[in-house]
Image: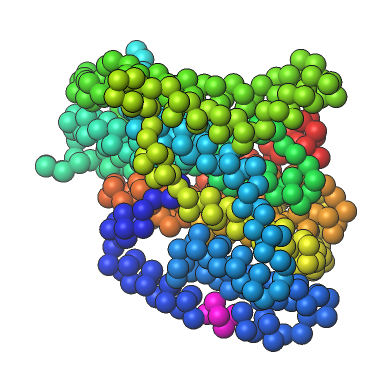
Amino acid sequence: MDIDDDMVQARLSPQEEKFEWWRQTIGLFIGPVGFFILYLLPTPSLSMEGHMLAAILGLVITYWITEPIPIPVTALLGAALCVISGVAPAKAVLSPFADPIVFLFIGSFMIAKAMSLHKLDRRFAYYIFSIKGIGNNPLSLLIACGVIVALISMWISNTAATAIMLPIGIGVIRTIERFPVVGEAGKLSGTQLRYRTGFMLMIAYGASIGGIATPVGSPPNLITMGMIESLADFRITFFQWMLFGVPLLVMMFILLTLILRFLNPPPGGKLSDNIELLSGIKSEVNIWSRGEMYTMLSFCLAVLLWVFPGITAGLFGSESEIYKSVKGVLDEGIVALIAASILFIIPTNWEKRTFAMTWGQAVKIDWGTIMLFGGGLSLGKLMFDTGVAKVIGTRLADAGGFEGLWSITALSIIIGILVSETTSNTASASMVIPVMIAVAQAAGVSPIPPALGAGLGASFGFMLPVSTPPNAIVYGSGMVPILSMVKAGLIFDILGFIMIWIGLRILCPVLGLM
């Protein structure tokens, strides 16, 4: 769920707006030039269809990086060009847009929208902040805020989770700043300025790492699952993803807390007055509405049915008939659609025929991400069908000397992180995962850990405001100097790479993801 372009634009400085204008303008013309250069170059190792697809990919990737047109439109344009140029027939190109994971996107986005509409997220935040010992301690508040945004981000988009927590975080900061630490007259002390920066970064980074814990937490996760199933013929269940995603989240959160505690130490002492902030939230969530209750029912049903096949496998074994029957019926996409349907079926007011969600509200979900996922899945499949991915993977493996499984996994994490710093994390996953699967297959090793590494790395753009929507949102608050974001983001990128690699190295063999 990307933030609105106008919102992002409004938060850019004049220098940044000028840079964006040049980036988009140059990209608009470089894309077609790259297309014709690749089309005219001889490629004896590729078929005619593969040669044409390579040229189209040159245009699409350039437009994804420079964004002269909306990223989802670029994905749709790429699919259309593949049909027009004869790379594949329309049915083959467009069938990935009806992949079951597309419907998992749709259903989970509707549930997330309902949670936001009925303020379930703010109720959750209030309960956490009300815990004794948290509401009056700056360090505890920092950690609690990170825990809240990470937990929320496990189930709704990183962008929405950040948008939810930003006003709460600003309220916390303003409350703390009523208790001045010694500094220049009329100004905030250096400690307070660093703390407010750390608090904002905790919201943004906490949302990003929270998204890795579940398949629905971040679009790159679903793209990874879809491409592994489509290109490597291996299916990762919702529960399997959580078995490695949640431990990774815990490790990354501890690391994030230590980094921000070191770079932006909180002021000492305790706060005796955090009543206003809590009272403001409590007034919004005092009484459970029927809309809230039905939304909670929808959410709990979805989570239960998503993890139920994994629980069944643990109880009866993955080869049991019970597990196979449950797994076949409870497809993640179907579960999402069933749970989302509850929002439209059970009335909140029978006489007025009102429901937890209206269709007018439902259609406001992020269709752009859904179209981008379909387009990325389509291009990824065509890369394999035409041999483009194999050629790129073989040459990349030969050039870099990467042959072992875990060296290729390290490479995929690095590429995923680097590409995501300047490109949408969804587009990054769509670009990098097919190539890394091909690299692994060319080297004769399992493509699962490299694909997971690329997908997780795509969620790890921490250095720049343009790297992820959460970064852009907190940067727009005016409380995060760009150099502070770059410094903290660089450290977190490097240590995050190590943590992902170690986590996959330990968990993939244990969980059978090989």
Task: Left or right? Give the position of 138 relative to 333.
Answer: left
For residue 496, what is the image quadrant?
Answer: top right
Does 291 sit left or right of 215 as displayed? left
Looking at the picture, how far across and down is residue 152, in whole percent?
Answer: 45, 31
Residue 428 percent coordinates (x, y): 58, 57
The image position of residue 161, as x and y in percent, is 41, 37
Q: Is residue 94 above or below residue 337?
A: below
Judge from the rendering whether residue 206 lies leftward or rightward of residue 377; answer left or right.
Answer: left
Q: Residue at x 34, y 19 (%)?
A: 350
Which one is nearer the viewer's eye here, 176 or 49?
49
Q: Is residue 62 above or below residue 138?
A: below
The residue at 45%/68% (across/down) is 69
Which residue extends farthest front? 351
Of helix, strand and loop, which mostly describes the magenta segment? helix
Give the colouring mode of the picture: rainbow
- Decide if residue 127 is in sight here: yes
Q: Is residue 31 magenta?
A: yes
Q: Nearer the viewer, residue 490 or 125?
A: 125
Among the 4 quarters of the image, the one containing residue 18: bottom left
**Magenta span contains residue 337:** no
Residues in magenta, as a range = 30-34
Does the rendering let one see residue 141? no
- Image quadrant for the C terminus? top right
Q: Position of residue 150 (x, y in %)?
A: 47, 33
Residue under the image location 38 percent in, 32 percent down: 357
